[in-house]
């Protein structure tokens, strides 16, 4: 089996004699057929092929195939954003009256999707600590629980998830574990190797890596046997009337049913499709992902160590540090590196944080993480500004917290920038 770096560069697309070396951008909404019968077969899913880019497009599919190979899955799809990926991943197997269990240490947008929007659709959620014991996790399950969700390294709290423990509990209850693997990327962690069943990504972050295209991806490990729990997953295991009574698990097997359903049913009806041009840009990012992740991690470790030794800094949280509270989990799941995001508190609290950030010259103030250019954010006065100091502390964001995304510049220059800002 080829290694991850080779998959980053060459996965997903193998040109034939005389074909373009780079993935072609198929900038076309529609595809031509000789007869209506030919096209009809596609509509009935009797044959595979392209007919309308809202459902599928060759450029996006080449890139989805690359991400699938990188994660070690059996099927994958791209979406228009990371939020769309998480929504489809859940909505593909949950409907009104269902329930899911999620780690509470997840991206704010996903938290809101689960806690507010899915609730309005009749899908209920129970949040659990990423550090919950097996017993505590099990206690959150109900007869109508359809999936367990978590992030490998959470954004922004940087908690590392015990994927194997979560997958064991999920499987004891006969449901899949869905992991958002955005922060480590498959270069640093492949959750399927630890028992996860479905992986999602905000490709917007390191995968694109240049802050140029919002996007998402969903990958299926092909290992979860939906047919063993057919009562729980009728959408996958009983006939779909919108496709003449076809049953996904029968027609596409357990390795293809989940992604096929998400494409032909949810993409068809919801249309959260990536633009072919964005898929092309994403692929350019993927070609150097393994090289960039290494540099992001080296730079972030250098900055985290500098911060840890600086008298102006009250505390530092970086999973790659020896002092990390998650050291054991990092040694197990993230041996090759974690991510480029560091959070820290500054002596002097909120006021000092604002003054410090204003004084930075290279590291820009942005609501973004995980691209080539270093940036930082003060959640208490931006993303979380409606909360009181007491509420901030309750949700794990202290008023002095600065989140810094370390880019690909020279670490010495970043450290010098931070030093002059102090
Ligand atoms: C950014 C992010 C998302 C959402 O992705 P968008 O492309 O902004 O929709 C989801 N999960 C994680 C972990 C993220 O960092």
Image (cartoon, grey):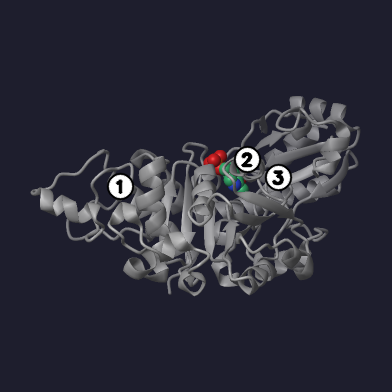
Which comes sooner in the sequence, label 2 or label 1? 1
Quarter location, residue 255: bottom left
What residue does disc 1 label? 57
Mark 2 packing: few (<14 Cα in 10 Å), some, or many (20+)? few
- Location of residue 230 with respect to 109 vertically, above or below: below
Q: Nearer the viewer, mark 2 or mark 3?
A: 2
Which comes sooner in the sequence, label 2 or label 3? 2
Q: Is residue 285 left or right of residue 351?
A: left
- Location of residue 359 with respect to 109 vertically, above or below: above
> Residue 392: x percent and y percent?
82, 37
Asked which secondary structure carries label 1, the reply is: loop
> Residue 295: x percent and y percent?
60, 52
Q: Measure how far apart labels 1 and 3 are at the Cα level.
A: 33 Å
Q: Residue at x 64, y 64 (%)?
A: 143
Name the mark on residue 247: none
Mark 3 packing: few (<14 Cα in 10 Å), some, or many (20+)? many
Residue 23 appearing in the image: no
What residue does disc 2 label? 109
For the residue pair 187 and 163, the one nearer the viewer reads as: 163
Q: Nearer the viewer, mark 1 or mark 3?
A: 1
- Ligand 1 within 8 angstroms of badge 2 C-beta: yes
Q: Measure how far apart labels 2 and 1 are at the Cα level.
A: 27 Å
What residue does disc 3 label? 156
Q: Residue at x 71, y 64 (%)?
A: 330
Residue 130 appearing in the image: yes
For the residue pair 314 and 136, the one nearer the viewer reads as: 136
Quarter location, residue 396: top right
Q: Measure how far apart labels 2 and 3 are at the Cα level.
A: 11 Å
């Amino acid at each position: 089996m080829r290694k991850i770096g080779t998959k980053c560069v060459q996965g997903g697309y193998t040109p034939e004699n005389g074909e373009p070396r780079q993935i072609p951008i198929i900038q076309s909404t529609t595809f031509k057929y000789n007869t209506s019968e030919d096209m009809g077969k596609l509509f009935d899913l009797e044959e595979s092929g392209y007919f309308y880019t809202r459902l599928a497009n060759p450029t996006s599919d080449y890139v989805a195939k690359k991400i699938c190979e990188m994660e070690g899955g059996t099927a994958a799809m791209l979406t228009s954003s990371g939020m769309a990926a998480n929504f489809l991943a859940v909505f593909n197997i949950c409907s009104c009256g269902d329930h899911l269990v999620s780690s509470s240490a997840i991206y704010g947008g996903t938290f809101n999707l689960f806690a507010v929007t899915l609730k309005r659709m009749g899908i209920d959620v129970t949040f659990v600590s990423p550090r919950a014991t097996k017993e505590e996790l099990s206690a959150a399950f109900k007869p109508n629980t359809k999936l367990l969700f978590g992030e490998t390294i959470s954004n922004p709290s940087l908690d590392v998830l015990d994927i194997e423990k979560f997958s064991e509990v999920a499987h004891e209850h006969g449901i899949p574990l869905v992991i958002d693997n955005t922060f480590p990327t498959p270069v640093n962690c492949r959750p399927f190797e630890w028992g996860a069943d479905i992986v999602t990504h905000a490709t917007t972050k390191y995968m694109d890596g240049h802050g140029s295209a919002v996007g998402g991806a969903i990958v299926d490990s092909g290992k979860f046997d939906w047919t063993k729990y057919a009562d729980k997953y009728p959408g996958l295991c009983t006939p779909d009337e919108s496709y003449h009574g076809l049953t996904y698990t029968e027609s596409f097997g357990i390795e293809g049913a989940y992604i096929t359903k998400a494409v032909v049913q949810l993409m068809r009806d919801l249309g959260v499709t990536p633009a072919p041009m964005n898929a092309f840009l994403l692929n350019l990012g993927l070609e150097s992902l393994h090289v960039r992740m290494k540099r992001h991690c080296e730079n972030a470790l250098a900055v985290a160590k500098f911060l840890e030794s600086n008298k102006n800094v009250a505390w530092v949280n970086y999973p790659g540090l020896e002092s990390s509270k998650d050291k054991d989990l990092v040694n197990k799941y993230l041996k090759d590196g974690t991510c480029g995001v560091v959070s820290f508190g500054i002596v002097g609290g909120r006021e000092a944080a604002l003054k410090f950030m204003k004084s930075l010259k290279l590291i820009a103030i942005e609501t973004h993480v995980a691209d080539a250019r270093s940036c930082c954010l003060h959640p208490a006065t931006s993303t979380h500004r409606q909360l009181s100091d007491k509420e901030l502390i309750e949700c794990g964001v202290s008023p002095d917290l600065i989140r810094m995304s370390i880019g690909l510049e020279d670490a010495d220059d970043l450290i010098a920038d931070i030093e002059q800002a102090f």
